[in-house]
Image (cartoon, rainbow, N blue to C red):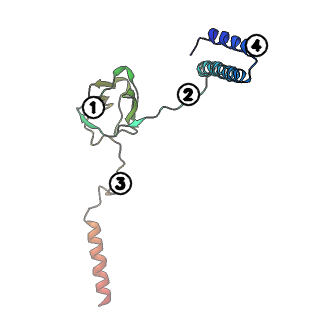
């Protein structure tokens, strides 16, 4: 595309030639060329405005489109007495393109621009509390390692928090076999009454 000054000069000269031309075919050709140059000139101005407008709207606090993430749901984990390590497989991640957020009961790691895609991984509710300030993320060539510092040392039975579905209601004084004995007594008394 011609520079803006050259395009304006060409347009000026074509208009001058159109004014001097006498033949209808030449006038038609010149008119169509003038229209094409005017369209090109106005679209170049629109492109320039389109390049500047997003920058101005970002400066004014406009909403930025939401980034799309692919979830990394496959992971493995291991633990010591004082920390848990979670391993997410991912080729080609760079440490400077990783952001993360830890709190006492969860974490989220976001990895940007790995072969044109963005990834997210995390656990929304951990089994037990962690120390967010002492937890970290390390990027290796083929994986991401999330190190979670346990708030209280000890063994975790699982990485995810799970509510206990079955809590037996056994009192210290009550014998676990008493329920069966009560059933047998009730059956015996019913049998005794029917005879």
| Residue 78 can be seen in this image | yes
Q: Quick one: 18 or 165, which is closer to the camera?
A: 18
Q: Where is residue 121 in the image (x, y as percent from the top left)?
A: 37, 35
- Crowding at dot 1, Cα within 10 Å, few <14 / some 14-19 / many 20+, comes out as some
Q: Name the residue under label 4.
A: 20
Give the label, 1 or 4, closer to the camera: 4
- The furthest residue to the front: 23
Give the label, 2 or 4, closer to the camera: 4
Q: Quick one: 120 or 3, which is closer to the camera?
A: 3
Q: Quick one: 9 or 110, which is closer to the camera?
A: 9
Give the spatial CA distance, label 2 vs label 1. Answer: 34 Å
Q: Is mark 4 on a helix, strand or loop?
A: helix
Q: Mark 3 points at which residue?
A: 165
Give the spatial CA distance, label 1 vs label 3. Answer: 27 Å
131 vs 81, left or right, is right
**Disc 2 + disc 1, Cβ < 8 Å:** no
Q: What element carries label 1?
A: strand
Give the spatial CA distance, label 3 vs label 4. Answer: 94 Å
Q: Quadrant of residue 43?
A: top right
Give the spatial CA distance, label 1 vs label 4. Answer: 82 Å
Give the spatial CA distance, label 3 vs label 2. Answer: 43 Å
């Amino acid at each position: 595309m011609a520079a803006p000054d050259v395009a304006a000069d060409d347009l000026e000269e074509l208009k001058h030639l159109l004014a001097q031309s006498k033949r209808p075919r030449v006038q038609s050709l010149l008119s169509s060329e003038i229209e094409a140059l005017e369209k090109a000139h106005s679209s170049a101005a629109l492109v320039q405005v389109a390049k500047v407008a997003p920058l101005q709207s970002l400066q004014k606090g406009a909403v930025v489109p939401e980034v799309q993430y692919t979830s990394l749901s496959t992971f493995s984990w291991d633990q010591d007495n004082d920390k848990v390590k979670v391993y997410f497989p991912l080729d080609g991640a760079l440490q400077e393109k990783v952001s993360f957020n830890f709190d006492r009961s969860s974490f989220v790691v976001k990895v940007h621009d790995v072969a044109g895609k963005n990834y997210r991984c995390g656990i929304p509710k951990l089994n037990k509390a962690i120390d967010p300030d002492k937890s970290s993320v390390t990027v290796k060539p083929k994986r991401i390692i999330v190190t979670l510092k346990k708030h209280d040392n000890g063994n975790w039975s699982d990485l995810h928090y799970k509510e206990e579905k079955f809590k037996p209601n056994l009192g210290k004084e009550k014998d676990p076999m008493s329920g069966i004995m009560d059933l047998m007594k009730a059956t015996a008394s019913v049998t005794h009454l029917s005879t």
